[in-house]
Amino acid sequence: MGKAATSSSHLFIELQELRGDTWTETGRWNHALEEDALPLSPGHDASDPHTWSQPRLPTISVAAVVRLQLALSPANVFLGLRADSLREIAEAMLQRLVAGGLLAAEQHERVAEALLSAKRLAPGPDSPNR
């Protein structure tokens, strides 16, 4: 691999959970290191909902690997999906869930709204929007 290919190979993942009506960043992975969001403690700035744990190498149990393998079944993975926006990806996922009987058709719009509600994202500790 050339130097250019190596320098552009960077993976950063954020985990956000829907808490009430707000998406909150609860974990992140950067170059295989994991960090967890820590709850607000006395003395911290109230505009900062959490701070981050020290980066560490994540560990995973055998049971979790088995659950991950089951979750990555072909029915749950979109390989070759042609989509140009998050909205198109969410729509494809929701249609698959409805077709598989895992989501009631009448819940489709509500779930789509929750998935696409970027305006409700709670700022993370490194966010410029804090």
Image (spheres, grey):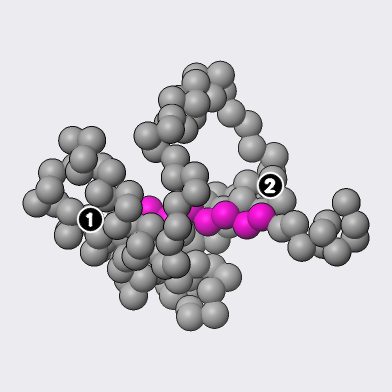
Magenta span contains residue 9: no
Answer with the quarter of the image where residue 9 lies.
bottom right
Quick one: 115 or 55, which is closer to the camera? 115
Rate crowding at label 1 as few (under 14), some (14 to 19) or many (20 or more) other CA atoms within 10 Å.
some
Q: Is residue 85 above or below residue 5?
A: below
Q: Examine the rendering and report whether any part of residue 33 can be seen.
A: yes
Rate crowding at label 2 as few (under 14), some (14 to 19) or many (20 or more) other CA atoms within 10 Å.
few
> Given the image, on which type of amino acid does mark 2 rest?
Leu
> Given the image, on which type of amino acid does mark 1 rest?
Val
Residue 71 percent coordinates (x, y) = 42, 31
Q: Residue at x 50, y 49 (%)?
A: 80
Q: Is residue 118 left or right of residue 100?
A: right
Residue 119 percent coordinates (x, y) = 34, 75
State the predominant SS element of the stretch in magenta: strand
Q: Is residue 44 above or below residue 90?
A: below
Boundaries of the magenta span: 11-17
Q: Which marked residue is nearer to the observer: mark 1 or mark 2?
A: 1
Report helix, strand or loop for mark 1: helix
Q: Examine the rendering and report whether any part of residue 23 can be seen.
A: no
Q: Which residue is mark 2?
A: 33
Q: Which residue is mark 1?
A: 111
